[in-house]
Image (cartoon, grey):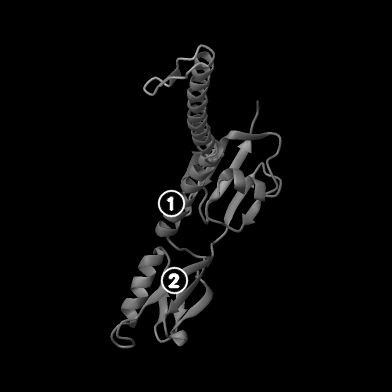
Amino acid sequence: MHSIRCVPSAFMCSHPLLTPLSLISYQFRHVLVAGLIGGYFLSLTSLTFAQTDSLPSSPASGSQTVVVQDVVSSEVSQFLSTYRMGTGDVISIRVFGEPDLSISNVRLSEVGTVFLPTIGETKVGGLTLTEVERAVADRLRGRILVNPRVSVSVEQYRPFFINGLVRSPGAYPYQPGLTVRKASSLAGGLHERASLRKIFVIRADDPFQKQERIGIDSVVFPGDIVTIEESFF
C-alpha cells in the first residue's frame, strides 16, 4: 500500500496519480476566483458608465429659447422703466392706505394732466412712472400725509398708427415688445407689393416729427406712426 506525503507549502502531493489532479484543482480555484473578481469590477464599471449616460442634458434649442426669452424680457423691462407717458395713456395712481387719494383707469388729458383728489390737476405727461410717483408723493407730503407711498401703473397705452400697404390701416392698441412685423400682422398683413425696404416711422416723442427709415423688425412705441410704402420692382 502506497503512502501519501503532502508538502504544505506547495499544496502538491507526491502520489503519482493524485499530483496532477491536485494541481489542476488548485489552478482552477485561482482562475475561478480571479474571474469572479474581474466580473465584479466590470459590473461596477458598466454601472458607472450607464449612470453617466443617463444624466439629463439640456438640448441646444432649449438653451437658445431661454436666451431669446431673456433678451425680450430685458427689452420690455427697459421700455417700462424709460417710457414717458403722453396723451391717450390710461393710468392708475394708488396711495397706499389712502383709497380716497387714489385714482384708477384715468386717461391723460390733451395737455398730459390728470385730476387727483385734494391735489387737483397734476402734470404727468412726459414723465416716467418713477418720476410721476415722486411728483405725487412730494405734493402729498407735509400738508396731507407724513410719508406717502405712491404707485403708478399704465393700464392702457396710447395706440400706434400704421398705414400704407397694409390690408387694414388705422390705429391699434399698443403692447410692449411691438415691432413693425407684429404691427403689420395686427393690421391684417402686408399687401403683395409692400416694400420691406421702404418702411418709415414718425416717433411720437420727436419734437420735429421727422420721418425716419426703419426695418421690418424695428421696435414700435406708443403713438408712433408707421408707413409702409409700395415696391415698384
| Left or right: 102 as drawn, with respect to 163 | left
> How far, Cα to Cα, is label 1 from label 2?
24 Å
Closer to the camera: disc 1 or disc 2?
2
Query: For mark 1, what is the residue?
Result: 206
Relative to 55, residue 104 above or below: below
Q: Does any portion of residue 205 appear in the rendered image? A: no
Disc assigned to residue 113? none
Picture coordinates of residue 174, whole percent (x, y): 57, 57
Foreground pick, 152 / 111: 152
Q: Residue 33 location, x and y as percent?
A: 49, 28
Q: Residue at x 50, y 16 (%)?
A: 2
For the question of whether residue 142 can be seen, the reply is yes
Question: Which tag, 1 or 2, sits closer to the chain's start?
Answer: 2
Of residues 36 and 196, which is closer to you in this image? Answer: 36
**Residue ID at (54%, 42%):** 65
Q: Which residue is mark 2?
A: 152
Element class at badge 1: loop
Q: Is residue 96 shown above or below 59? A: below
Q: Pointers 1 and 2 in contact (CB under 8 A)?
A: no
Residue at 50% x, 53% y: name it: 221
Q: Counting other residues with Cα less than 10 Å from the Cα at mark 1, is it few (<14), some (14-19), or many (20 or more)?
A: few
Bin the neighbour count of mark 2 within 10 Å (Cα to Cα): few under 14, some 14-19, many 20 and up: many
Q: Quadrant of the C terminus?
A: top right
Residue lying furthest top in this view? 16
Whether residue 219 is situated above or below residue 233 in the rendered picture: below
Number of numbered callouts drawn: 2
**Residue type highlighted by circle 2:** Val
Disc 1 residue type (three-letter): Asp
Q: Which element type, helix, strand or loop, lies under badge 2?
A: strand
Percent position (x, y) of residue 173? 60, 59
Please state the horizontal and vertical placement of residue 108, each as a whole percent of the image.
Answer: 50, 70
